[in-house]
Amino acid sequence: VACLSMAAPVLAAGMEGKVVGFSQIGSESGWRAAETTLTQNQAKERGIDLKFADAQQKQENQIKAVRGFIAQGVDAILIAPVVATGWDDVLAEAKDAEIPVVLLDRQIEAPEDLYLTAVTSDQVHEGKVAGDWLVADVGDKACKVVELQGTTGSSPAINRKQGFEEAIAGHDNITIARSQTGDFTRTKGKEVMESFIKAENGGKDICAVYAHNDDMAVGAIQAIKEAGLKPGTDIKIVSIDAVPDIFLAMAEGEANATVELTPDMAGPAFDVLAAYLADGTAPAKWIQTESKLFTQADDPKAVYEAKKGLGY
Ligand code: AHR
């Protein structure tokens, strides 16, 4: 009788048996869902016991979850902070308990000694890349832009706005006519876009949409189609994230450009935590992820196929 033996799975080194609490914002976007999936996958591959808490977009729920993790005596804590301010007290409690905290995907306004590191993109740069694309695309033509902002008070909403404004500064033909939050969701992106269309001559006066994430852009695309206009042609669409759905829209000619944000923030976070927990090696305070521009020229159908399954 043949004897079958199964090889034990090979675990990425350093974090096996560690308990890590993860305070996630919620599930507002396709990107966020992918980040959750990839964090769980990374934890599994490394033999980490991940305690997951979904804050349903509320900072108070995040603070409660972090206090719970501290009480349990976890080895480390990951926080994707919904807003930029209001973290000092709970971070000081984690520091007192000697539990390292790593911030994922959003920055905060707090003293740097309260957390180990932050794994994020340069969000001002993301906004600038989006704005530079529009400046080049529009040339000398007059262009009224409508902006769909992310969650009010969140670092990506603040920084992506700033970066875009920096890019269009000095190009007086491009103006931001309207700007409102769509809370990073598809539903609100659509709702707000409908109100922009109403206010701007049925959409005919709008030249471009700048959305702080792809999900809001997808909602806006829907609203534009329902208003009888062609997204991507009558109204240009530029956004951030590079989730698979925006590549489908690009393949249809309905979206124009997106700036990629990797959903794998946990991989680098677990790598530095492994070193820190082993011998106290302190990482850089900021681990910056890449921000790559994709346009319709980048074979969107192929990118869509490649991205599907990578946590999305
Ligand atoms: O913090 C990253 C942002 O949060 C993503 O761009 C957006 O989709 C998400 O909700």
Image: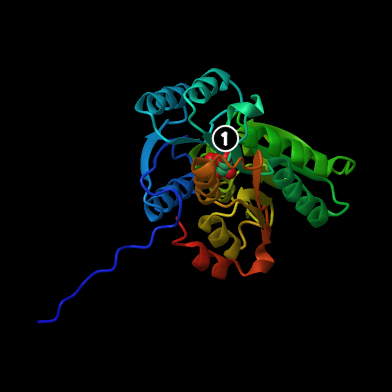
Q: Secondary structure at mark 1?
A: loop
Tell me where residue 246 appears, x and y as whole percent.
56, 56
Residue drawn at x 56%, y 39% is 280
Residue drawn at x 67%, y 45% is 209
Tell me: residue 252, above or below residue 54. Answer: below
Furthest residue toward bottom: 1
Tell me where residue 295 appears, x and y as whole percent.
68, 61
Q: Which residue is mark 1?
A: 182
Q: Amino acid at mark 1?
A: Gly
Q: Nearer the viewer, residue 261 or 118?
A: 118
Tell me: residue 267, above or below residue 51. Answer: below
Please indicate whether residue 300 sits to the left or right of residue 52 in the image: right
Residue 105 is at least partly visible in this image: yes
Residue drawn at x 43%, y 52% is 42
Please indicate whether residue 165 sits to the left or right of residue 40 in the image: right
Please indicate whether residue 166 sits to the left or right of residue 261 in the image: right
Tell me where residue 285 appears, x and y as whole percent.
66, 38
Residue drawn at x 46%, y 21% is 60
Specify the quadrant that holds the N terminus. Answer: bottom left
Ligand 1 shows up in the quarter that is top right
Please indicate whether residue 127 sits to the left or right of residue 83 in the image: right
Tell me: residue 214, above or below residue 192. Answer: below
Marker count (numbered): 1
Q: Nearer the viewer, residue 189 or 8?
A: 8
Tell me where residue 109 appears, x and y as whole percent.
65, 26
Examine the image and state in which quarter residue 69 appears. Answer: top left
